[in-house]
Structures are given as structure tokens and as C-alpha cells.
Image (cartoon, helix red, strand yellow):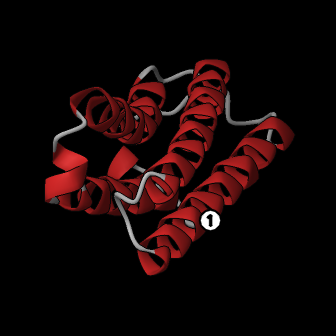
Amino acid sequence: MAKIERFEDIKAWQLSRELVKKIYALSKEPKFSKDFGFKDQITRAAVSVMSNIAEGFERYTKSEFIQFLVIAKGSVGEVRSQVYVAYDSGYIVEQDFLKLKGDCEIISRCLWNLIKYLKGNQKAESFSN
């Protein structure tokens, strides 16, 4: 695994940032944008993924980092579920649904792999900048 010196180096954070951009762009579409509650929920959940990765990294301890990665993984699951709602409600087309769902699955796997790596690497007890 490549050395991670900043949270911006984390692949899952990079992918989450791209997901946020896509969610925000799609949520500006007329049908989607009028459902204020749903738009707020899906955008907050998407932002939560990248924010929890960053916050966990900045906490410096491995155990806290893992805890925040688990929270981020939960948030990406929430986004994936909401992508179904957006599709079923006619807010996004099938192509966007499949892409977003796939993006969420990739981020979830990245987070899981990072969690497994960190749990197996008992030597690195802290993360410093």
C-alpha cells in the first residue's frame, strides 16, 4: 500500500469526492431539485463519506481512524440506498443509477480493504502528517 501522508492521498476519499460532485450535479436537475428533503439527505450522506474519512485521519490514532472509516462505509451504504430512491422516483436515469451504484460499491470495497489493512497492521499505532 502506498504511504498515506494526508487524507487527500486516500483513494476512498478521492473517489468519495468524485461521488459528491456527481450527486450535487444530478441534484440540480429540475425534478430532483424540487424534492428538498431528499436532495438534502442524499447530499449530506455523500459529503459525510469524505468528511468522515478526513476526520478519522486527522484524529491521528489508528483506532479512531478505523472507527471513522466504518462510519464512512455506513454513509456510502446510505448513499447507495438513496440512489435507488432517486432512480425509482424518476429523478435519475438508469445509466446514472448504475454508475452511482457502482461508484458506491467501489468506495465501500476501498473502505473495507483499508479497514482490514489497518486492523492487520498493529505496528502503526498513530498517523502523523
Report x, y in % for residue 110.
64, 58
Of all residues, the one furthest to the bottom in this rendering is 95
Quadrant assignment, res 16: bottom left
Q: Is residue 100 above or below residue 58?
A: below
The residue lying toward the viewer, choosing from 13 and 3, is: 13
Quadrant assignment, res 59: top left
Q: Residue at x 43, y 62 (%)?
A: 15
Q: Which residue is mark 1?
A: 106
The residue lying toward the viewer, choosing from 47 and 66, is: 47
Whether residue 51 appears in this view of the structure is: yes
Q: Is residue 122 above or below residue 24?
A: above
Q: Relative to 90, is 65 on the left or the right? A: right
Q: Residue at x 51, y 43 (%)?
A: 82
Quadrant assignment, res 63: top right
Residue type, mark 1 in image: Ile
Q: Mark 1: few, some, or many residues within 10 Å (few <14, many ≥20)?
A: some
Q: Is residue 29 above or below residue 116?
A: below
The residue lying toward the viewer, choosing from 104 and 129, is: 104
In the rendered image, which quarter contains the C terminus? Answer: top left
